[in-house]
Image (cartoon, rainbow, N blue to C red):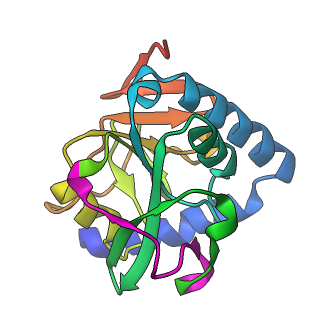
Amino acid sequence: MTKKEHKAELRVTMRALAAELSEKYKAQADAAIATHLVAMPEYQAADVVFCYVGTGWEINTRPILEHALNARKTVCVPRCEAEGIFTLRQIASLEQLAAGAYGILEPDAGAPSLSVDQVDFAILPCLTCNHLGQRLGQGGGYYDRFLAHYRGGAVLLCRENLIREEIPVEPLDMPVPWVLTENGLYEDGTPARLG
């Protein structure tokens, strides 16, 4: 089996597992993840925060986005521009988000654009990952393209029940230094202190 085939098979498995998680577990895990995240010194020190907008099975990032906006940080979120490509668009309120490509909430085309170099701290999704920060996404390559150019601090959000240590990795797959679950923060595979 090729790595590409292994990834496709793992995506099917992980989507099925994600669909079986109870609403109670997801809500508790998501709340704990948000609490852990805003305690991270790297997040607290960041002036410009990039964060995905959680939808459907993903971790609810709304509390994180609201916290960042209330803390007067510059907040940018992805806006899908073409297959595999998003731009970073600044928002001042969650009210600016509407369903766009693939039903994902995003700002309209008039929202100010930021460059990758302006971001101090990035909060990224995954379908699954391991504690080393090797991630499996949806397969569109959006975040791998972002990570290929990004040099700031980044954290992957993943519920502990969806962590898998065996992640098929290809040369273009970019690892993320921090992984945050409801159980806490991992840095390069090792449990780390949050503050």
Magenta stretch holds residue 80: no
92 or 100, which lies in front?
92
93 or 101, which lies in front?
93
Horizontally, residue 121 falls left or right of residue 3, namely: right
| Location of residue 86 in the rendering, given as x and y in whole percent from the top left corner | 36, 74
| Location of residue 131 in the rendering, given as x and y in whole percent from the top left corner | 40, 35
Q: In the picture, residue 3 is in which quadrant?
A: bottom left
Residue at 70 percent of width and 66 percent of height: 95
Q: How many marks?
A: 0
Check the picture and name the quadrant holding the N terminus: bottom left
| Location of residue 176 in the rendering, given as x and y in whole percent from the top left corner | 31, 43
* Residue 168 shows in this picture: yes
Q: In the picture, residue 63 is in which quadrant?
A: top right
Q: Residue furthest left?
A: 171
Residue at 66 percent of width and 45 percent of height: 66
191 or 164, which lies in front?
191
* Residue 56 shows in this picture: no
Vertical side of 121 occupied by 62: above or below: below
Vertical side of 19 occupied by 147: above or below: above
| Location of residue 148 in the rendering, given as x and y in whole percent from the top left corner | 17, 58
Q: In the picture, residue 37 is in which quadrant?
A: top right
The residue range painted magenta reads 102-117
Horizontally, residue 154 falls left or right of residue 169, namely: right
Horizontally, residue 54 falls left or right of residue 171, namely: right
